[in-house]
Image (spheres, rainbow, N blue to C red):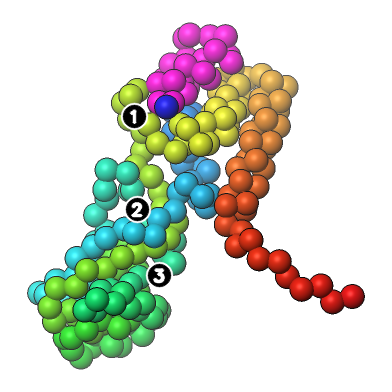
Amino acid sequence: MSTFGDLKTLVAQDLSRSDLTSQISAAVLSSIQDHSVERFYFNETRDFSISLTTGSSGIYAITPTSTIQEFIKIDWIRVQIGSQWTRLDRIDSDNMEEFKSATTTGQPSWWTYVADRLSFYPEPGSTYSARIAGHVRLVALSADADTNAWTNAAKDLIRYSALKRVLAFPVRNAEAALGAATMEAQQLDTLRRETDRRKRQGRMAAYYG
């Protein structure tokens, strides 16, 4: 399993330089940050859990876990009602504000996400377990021993993206940076195709000639 330290070492070897440690580290983190805005098969979840409790005004922060920092896009939220997981309806923040002008407690039916907070209505009248699915940003790498999907499944994408950045600045080798950018684009295409392959449902569509 590749680590943050392994990835930085790989970039240093590509550069054939050992004096750009801080620049390489920053380039790796910036590359991950930029590519995180695209959804791949490894930066999404379907089972992020939160507890909806009383006395919260129906507003909750998404607390980071050891692996997930935040949601970039939420697909759906389901709440456990008895033995069933019920999918809630999403509404915009204006409608939520109108709803909340009159406090009502009970079983949550609607939700919205604004200012990094989840808001539910009606406000929970008891404790409910909720599951969230969507596109997530993984917790940033810090120690050399840290590892996640970016240092493994997307290792070569981040490798060439970071290499491109360092070659452009501070090395100032535009030709070599362009070569690294080409390799980055190839790796990005590979990950996109792999993501598409994993998401296919495997059903054949009828052909009408």
Mark 2 crowd level (few <14, some 14–19, many ≥20, 10 Å Cα): some
Residue at x-position 81% and y-position 72%: 207
Quarter of the image holding residue 110? bottom left
Instruction: Give the residue number, with chain letter if any, for mark 3.
Output: 76
Instruction: Give the residue number, with chain letter if any, for mark 1.
Output: 146
Whichever of labels 3 and 2 marks the residue nearer the N terminus, that label is 2
Our reading of the magenta stretch's main secondary structure is helix
Residue 188 vs 94, above or below: the answer is above
Comparing 198 with 101, the one in front is 198
Q: Which residues are magenta?
A: 2-24
Residue 63 vs 170, above or below: the answer is below
Whichever of labels 3 and 1 marks the residue nearer the N terminus, that label is 3
Where is residue 2 shown, x and y percent of the image?
A: 44, 26
Residue at x-position 60% and y-position 43%: 191
On the rendered structure, is 176 left or right of 72?
right
On the rendered structure, is 58 left or right of 149?
left
Query: Residue 70 bears which disc, if any?
Result: 2
Q: Nearer the viewer, mark 1 or mark 2?
A: 1
Residue 169 shows up from this direction: no
Residue 178 vs 103, above or below: the answer is above
Instruction: State yes or no: discs 3 and 2 in contact (Cβ < 8 Å).
Output: no
- Tag 3: amino acid: Trp
- Tag 2: amino acid: Glu
Mark-to-mark CA distance, 3 and 2 = 15 Å
Where is residue 33 shown, x and y percent of the image?
A: 46, 41
Element type at mark 1: loop
